[in-house]
């Protein structure tokens, strides 16, 4: 199954190390950072799970709930989390989907046969409070994710929703953003009374709070 940006994230009910959850009900009015891992007790995955736990306050400040997935059982997750907490000096509390039968991984197209027929690649889905997929990323098994980029794209998506803007290459929070060409100057004056810089008629940049 191929999922696209703008699709409704497929709902599912599944076991985790914290007990069963249903995705849409569990997400509630929050954003979701849904990310998959090849397997428990593997080195790159251990660092990524630990980093997610270390960033708990950053995710909470953005109204984002992390949700991991690995193609192992909930009991294996519980044992592995002890290693994650010990080696990464953290306290992992977010749920990790137990997907030993690969049903969720296949639903979200996380199984790439040239990589593995039984383990998920490093997929990322950012899901908004309306349960829409807003961003996808896929990393190979050998490359750990850049969590600064995960937070950056969440900031960009949330700011875009709030202010009707787009973000330029390498945008960072607090930097200038782009007024989309679909917003004509008359409407832009009402939305951005502070004014903007017009580099070209189609490229206008502005600072927003």
Image (cartoon, grey):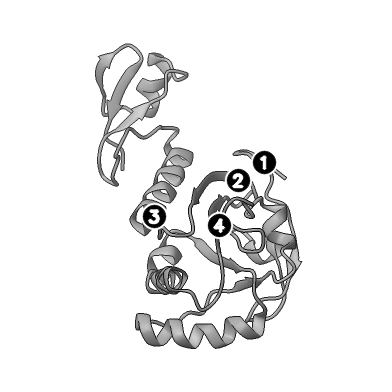
Query: What residue does disc 1 label?
Result: 7
Image quarter where the N terminus lies is top right
Circle 2 residues within 10 Å: few <14, some 14–19, many ≥20? many
- The alpha-carbon separation of the residues under discs 3 and 4 comes to 20 Å
Query: What residue does disc 4 label?
Result: 121
Q: Quadrant of residue 103?
A: bottom right
Query: Along the polypeptide, which appears first: circle 2 or circle 1?
Result: 1
Query: Along the polypeptide, which appears first: circle 3 or circle 4?
Result: 4
Query: Along the polypeptide, which appears first: circle 3 or circle 2?
Result: 2
Identify which residue, 171 or 138, lies in the foreground: 138
Secondary structure of the residue carrying numbered label 2: strand
Q: Is residue 195 above or below residue 21?
A: above
- The alpha-carbon separation of the residues under discs 3 and 2 comes to 16 Å
Q: Quadrant of residue 195?
A: top left
Query: What residue does disc 2 label?
Result: 133
Q: Is residue 67 above or below residue 183?
A: below
Identify which residue, 59 or 51, lies in the foreground: 51
Task: Between label 4 and label 1, give the one nearer the viewer.
Answer: 4
Side (left or right) of 175 relative to 161 = left
Secondary structure of the residue carrying numbered label 1: loop
| Residue depicted at 47% across the width and 18% down the height | 182
Please provide percent x and percent y for residue 169: 31, 34
Query: Along the polypeptide, which appears first: circle 4 or circle 2?
Result: 4
- The alpha-carbon separation of the residues under discs 4 and 2 comes to 18 Å
Please provide percent x and percent y for residue 71: 64, 69
Residue 151: give its label. 3
Q: Mark 2 near mark 1, Cβ–Cβ under 8 Å?
A: yes
Secondary structure of the residue carrying numbered label 4: loop
Query: Along the polypeptide, which appears first: circle 4 or circle 1?
Result: 1
Secondary structure of the residue carrying numbered label 3: helix
């Amino acid at each position: 199954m191929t999922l696209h940006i703008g699709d409704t994230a497929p709902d599912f009910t599944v076991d985790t190390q914290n007990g069963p959850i249903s995705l849409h009900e569990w997400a509630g009015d929050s954003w979701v950072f849904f990310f998959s891992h090849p397997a428990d007790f593997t080195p790159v995955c251990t660092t990524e799970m630990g980093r997610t736990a270390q960033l708990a306050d950053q995710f909470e400040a953005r109204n984002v709930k992390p949700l991991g997935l690995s193609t192992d059982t909930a009991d294996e997750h519980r044992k592995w989390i002890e290693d994650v907490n010990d080696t990464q000096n953290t306290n992992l509390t977010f749920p990790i989907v137990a997907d030993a039968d690969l049903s969720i991984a296949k639903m979200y197209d996380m199984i790439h046969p040239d990589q593995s027929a039984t383990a998920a690649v490093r997929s990322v889905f950012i899901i908004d409070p309306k349960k829409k997929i807003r961003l996808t990323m896929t990393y190979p098994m050998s490359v750990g994710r850049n969590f600064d980029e995960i937070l950056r794209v969440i900031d960009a998506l949330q700011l875009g929703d709030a202010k009707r803007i787009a973000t330029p290459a390498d945008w960072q929070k607090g930097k200038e953003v782009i007024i989309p060409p679909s917003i004509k100057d008359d409407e832009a004056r009402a939305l951005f009374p502070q004014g903007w810089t017009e580099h070209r008629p189609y490229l206008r940049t502005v600072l927003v709070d």
